[in-house]
Image (cartoon, rainbow, N blue to C red):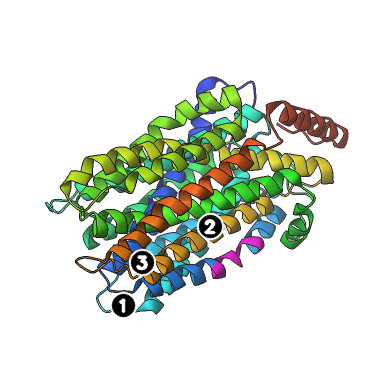
Amino acid sequence: MTRVTATDTQSTRIFALAAYAAPGVPEAMLLYCASLVIPGFYATEMGLSTRVIGISMVVARMFDALIDPVIGYLSDRSAHLWGGRKPWLAAGALVSSVAVAFLYAPHKGIDAGYYLGWTICLYFGWTMAIIPYDAWGADISSEYLERTRIFTYRATAYYLGSLLFLVSPFLGASPDVSFNAEVLKFNAGLVAVLFAITVPIAFRYGPRGRPGQARSPIGFWSILANVRNNRPMLLFLLSYSISGISLGVFLALSYIYVVSYLKLPQAFPVILLSYAVANLLSVPIWLRIIRRIGKHRAWALGVFGDAIIYPFLAPLTPGPASYIPALVIITISGFADAVSRVAADAILGDVVDFDELKTGKNRAANYYALKSLVTKGNIALGGGFAFLTIGLFGYDPAAPSNSQWGVFGLRLTLLFIPAALYVISGLLMWRFPIDRRRQDVIRRRLDTRALRLGIRHE
């Protein structure tokens, strides 16, 4: 593993950051499928009820959330050792690869226990990998724009992975361009192969984190007790939670909206592909916007964009005439969503520095464990709320048609409730207190303290 410094050539820095970001490709393939396709696939193809899926999503996420503080604490405890964060990423990639092999290839006659068990296994593997991986990214640099650059590489890898997943239905010989059983099985194998390739590359060539970053880890629950005195973290968590729940609803129901309601099953891969292309192409644009107005305000603009665009899907009716409008609207949403992948982790890295300045302890993995817990809560609450609510309105994804009341429930749940929550989230993030100037002050004070203690912060 290399250490990226100011004296490195531009090509060396690019290569090192690309190596660090590489595991984001299979990570995105895994998460895109698990969030966007698997719940709807099990509802429409495997015969599980929306109530069973909604409850299973909540239970799986709640169980998985119990693991987050343990992984965060152990990762911080081991980060001062050579490769301390790396074994977690490797183990998480292995567990995730096994889980997708079963979750993406269900046999006929499976029950709720099968779906719940392998979903729990998948989220457990993801937790083992993603918390140390995020903390590693925050440890690489504490400079405001350099940290943004690091997570821009991560976002780019993530969107490349999502793009690869979304083109997979077009790679087979079948004329049925959809996320069928064969496509899901192919993705399970591809995820395993890519983890086996990218994780060793990241270990060997990725940049090294700051030395001594884990000398004083404390318990995860102690951080929760201190969060109420950390205004930046409170604002971050509140805004992130509200927007995350909205995104969880959209991810859970987009498959059902396009395939079941609009009756466009073959259009769904194309729409998602266009969404992912918009994600990828917009990353450098958002980076320029961040340089001009800051991370938090750029993130707020993206959230406001989603709030505006979602309701435009409401007038669409089933049939081919809705294909192009749905494609255009969801693609625009993809542009707005992309900033969150760049900004959120970089902003949390700034919060970690703020906490370290106040407490003298670097607890990056514990803070990213808290973010991971909230992320899972967002998806669980958003997805569980989505399926349970459309069930209460009587919407049946497997039915040839639904009542007006059921359709109203689908539109309300998918489009208007998330739009209102996005507005609230954007207003909160607009007032986030750590901007570039304040982060520069924090970094200089941390560097001064590190010099006194004989620890060099990069």
Which image quarter is the N terminus in? top right
Q: Amino acid at mark 2?
A: Asn
Contact check, label 3 and label 2, Cβ < 8 Å: no
The question of residue 20 being in magenta is answered with no
Contact check, label 3 and label 1, Cβ < 8 Å: no
Specify the segment rendered in magenta. 62-69
Write down the residue under mark 3.
Answer: 103
Q: Give the farthest residue toward the front.
A: 404
The question of residue 66 being in magenta is answered with yes
| Main SS category, magenta section | helix
Q: Secondary structure at mark 3?
A: helix
Distance from disc 1 to disc 2, alpha carbons, whole Å, reads 27 Å
Instruction: Tell me which label, 1 or 2, sits earlier in the chain.
Output: 1
Q: Secondary structure at mark 1?
A: loop
Q: Amino acid at mark 1?
A: Ile
The residue positioned 14% from the left and 54% from the top of the image is 176
Q: Residues within 10 Å of mark 3 (few under 14, many from 20)?
A: many
Vertical arrangement, residue 211 with respect to residue 250, above or below: above
Q: Amino acid at mark 3?
A: Leu
Write down the residue under mark 1.
Answer: 110
How many badges with numbers are in the image?
3
Instruction: Tell me which label, 3 or 1, sits earlier in the chain.
Output: 3
Q: Residues within 10 Å of mark 2 (few under 14, many from 20)?
A: many
Measured as percent of width and height from the top left, residue 427 is found at 60, 40
